[in-house]
Image: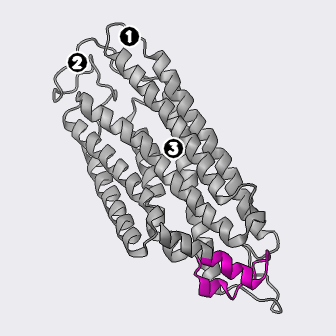
């Protein structure tokens, strides 16, 4: 937040004696590149959602739109660095958008649990969605309240932005801890599906006397598990960066150095957004005909078919 009591006109040249909220002039080139990348990824997610009729995937579309708006605002700020509106748009959308991709990841894990059985997870699919989405909501609420407090204090002479900043830090650290807990649970689910050598990641050593899952199904599930892992790690890495950034304060080294924001927020979110364009859940989740031939170590083939049919029915009704 600007420490000065007098803010220059929105499109004034950068003044090192009166730095803007960013502490620098946002990069025009980076803004254009990220607008293009997020625009392509969001359009692809929208097309895949409409074609697949898996409407829950619209969370990826909304998350992509949020990232797109945020980088449009930063591109605007590259020309009007003192624009308070551009600053507020980019900070709000770029804080909120990652939570939408996290929600999509919770849903994907729910599908995996439905397919492999409840014994692979300490929580049900619905519990993952409700518990972690509720945590994300309250963490975002804390960040929004803190941001509002800091913004109001920063606009007043001798205003104290520390209470608002501390509230934002509490929200983003709370969200980071939640992401880490989810990552551990996700790893636990994958490990349990692999324990007998028949899971997502390790099915190559099955005996020829056993009924094996079709190779295409196995490969698709491996790809989906890998994509979900990559996206989760990208969100966690971004959360670590944003937490340290805010702990250092509004005039700290990280928050006032543009290359870190480009690399540790923008680039990481491109990875989190784009990975499901190439590894789209609709094409990778097994269909009933494939799972009917599989023996997934947690019930009869009839139970497996019924479970996958239930997953498909849920997706079609969404």
Task: Judge whether residue 295 is colored magenta.
Answer: yes
Task: Judge whether residue 14 is colored magenta.
Answer: no
Mark 3 — residue?
Answer: 238
Q: Position of residue 228 (x, y in %)?
A: 57, 61
Sequence-wise first label, 2 or 1: 2
The structure residue drawn at horizontal position 16% and vertical position 26%, both measured from the top left corner, is 12
Mark 2 — residue?
Answer: 7
User: Does residue 279 appear in this view?
Assistant: no
The reply to whether discs 2 and 1 touch (Cβ–Cβ < 8 Å) is no
Q: Circle 3 — which element?
A: helix
Residue farthest to the top, as pictured:
158
Q: Position of residue 267 (x, y in %)?
A: 43, 50
Q: How is the image coloured?
A: one colour
The reply to whether discs 3 and 1 touch (Cβ–Cβ < 8 Å) is no
Label 1 Cα crowd, 10 Å radius (few <14 / some 14-19 / many 20+): some
Which of the labelled discs sits on residue 159, or is there none? 1
Magenta stretch bounds: 286-309
Camera-nearest label, 2 or 1: 1
């Amino acid at each position: 937040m600007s420490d000065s009591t007098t803010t220059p006109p929105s499109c004034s040249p950068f003044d090192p004696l009166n730095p803007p909220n960013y502490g620098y002039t946002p990069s025009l080139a980076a803004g254009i590149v990220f607008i293009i990348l997020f625009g392509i990824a969001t359009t692809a997610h929208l097309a895949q959602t409409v074609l697949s009729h898996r409407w829950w995937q619209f969370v990826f579309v909304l998350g992509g739109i949020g990232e797109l708006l945020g980088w449009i605002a930063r591109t605007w700020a590259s020309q009007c660095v003192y624009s308070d509106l551009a600053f507020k748009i980019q900070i709000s959308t770029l804080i909120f958008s990652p939570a939408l991709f996290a929600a999509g990841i919770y849903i994907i894990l729910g599908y995996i649990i439905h397919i492999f059985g409840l014994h692979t997870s300490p929580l049900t699919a619905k519990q993952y969605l409700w518990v972690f989405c509720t945590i994300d909501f309250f963490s975002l609420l804390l960040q929004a309240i803190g941001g509002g407090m800091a913004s109001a204090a920063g606009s007043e002479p001798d205003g104290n932005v520390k209470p608002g900043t501390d509230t934002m830090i509490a929200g983003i650290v709370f969200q980071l801890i939640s992401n880490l807990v989810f990552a551990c649970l996700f790893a636990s689910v994958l490990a349990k599906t692999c324990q007998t050598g028949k899971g997502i990641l390790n099915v190559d050593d099955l005996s020829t006397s056993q009924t094996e899952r079709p190779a295409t199904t196995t490969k698709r599930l491996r790809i989906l598990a890998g994509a979900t892992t990559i996206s989760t790690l990208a969100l966690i890495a971004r959360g670590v960066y944003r937490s340290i950034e805010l702990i250092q304060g509004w005039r700290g080294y990280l928050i006032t150095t543009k290359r870190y924001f480009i690399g540790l927020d923008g680039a990481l979110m491109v990875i989190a957004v784009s990975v499901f364009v190439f590894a789209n859940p609709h094409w990778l989740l097994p269909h009933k005909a494939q799972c009917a031939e599989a023996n997934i170590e947690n019930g009869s083939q009839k139970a497996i078919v019924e479970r996958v049919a239930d997953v498909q029915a849920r997706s079609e009704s969404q």
